[in-house]
Image: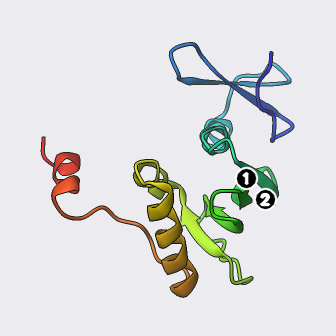
């Protein structure tokens, strides 16, 4: 039904209210591993329109990382889902928990962050200062 099926056993789709639904293509109930895989696949759905998955790294059925081609950054990069995976090809590394912060950045800010990530492999984007106060204050 028009869903994304990067994992041959699981399909996800976005509901009208913006949430994701997952199902196994063999119609069996989702296992906890399937649910984790569906969450990972949903990350791919959240990629900007001008970014493409060019490589997947898996350990069996478990998705560990994606290599992404970003038109905005004019470069390839890694999106890491499993910290046990450490690419050694010199590309910038991004982590799934950084995506909400990165979504708030301008194109120029993203390019600046990308330069830092290339210079300091494995570094992470964190939000500090007045902008972050709303994230932890309740």
Return the x and y of residue 52 as percentages of the image width and height. 76, 50
| Residue at the disc numbered 1 | 62
- Residue 75 sits above or below residue 66 on the image: below
Would residue 7 be found to the left or right of residue 70 on screen?
A: right
Q: Which residue is mark 2?
A: 58
Residue found at x 78% / y 59%:
58
In the image, is residue 106 above or below residue 84? above
Q: Is residue 88 left or right of residue 5?
A: left
Residue 65 location, quadrant? bottom right
* The residue positioned farthest toward the front in the image shown: 108
Q: Which of the numbered marks, if any, corresponds to residue 95?
A: none
Residue found at x 87% / y 37%:
8
Query: Residue at the location (44% across, 54% down)?
Result: 106
Q: Is residue 32 above or below residue 72?
A: above
The image shows residue 14 at horizontal and vertical percentages of 63, 22
Looking at the image, residue 125 lies above or below residue 96: below
**How far apart are the two marked residues, 1 and 2, measured between alpha carbons?**
5 Å
Q: Position of residue 80 (x, y in %)?
A: 61, 63
Dividing the picture into quadrants, the one containing residue 79 is bottom right
**Measuring 66% from the left and 33% from the top, which residue is drawn there?**
31
Q: Secondary structure at mark 1?
A: strand
Q: Which quarter shows the C terminus?
A: top left
Left or right, residue 64 beside residue 26:
left
**SS of the residue under disc 2:** strand
Q: Where does the N terminus fall, quadrant-wise?
A: top right
Please report contact status of discs 1 and 2: CB closer than 8 Å, yes or no. yes
Q: Position of residue 68 (x, y in %)?
A: 72, 59
How many neighbours does mark 1 have within 10 angstroms: few (below 14), some (14-19), or many (20 or more)?
Answer: some
């Amino acid at each position: 039904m028009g869903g994304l099926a990067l994992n041959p056993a699981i399909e996800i789709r976005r509901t009208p209210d913006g949430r994701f639904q997952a199902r196994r293509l063999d119609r069996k109930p989702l296992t906890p591993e399937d649910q984790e895989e569906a969450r990972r696949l949903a990350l791919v759905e959240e990629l900007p329109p001008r970014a493409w998955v060019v490589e997947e790294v898996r350990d069996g059925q478990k998705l560990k990382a994606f290599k992404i081609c970003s038109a905005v950054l004019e470069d390839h990069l890694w999106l890491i889902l499993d910290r046990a995976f450490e690419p050694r090809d010199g590309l910038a590394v991004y982590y799934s928990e950084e995506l909400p912060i990165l979504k708030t950045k301008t194109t120029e800010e993203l390019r600046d962050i990308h330069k830092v990530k290339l210079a300091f492999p494995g570094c992470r984007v964190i939000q500090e200062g007045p902008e972050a106060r709303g994230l932890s204050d309740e």
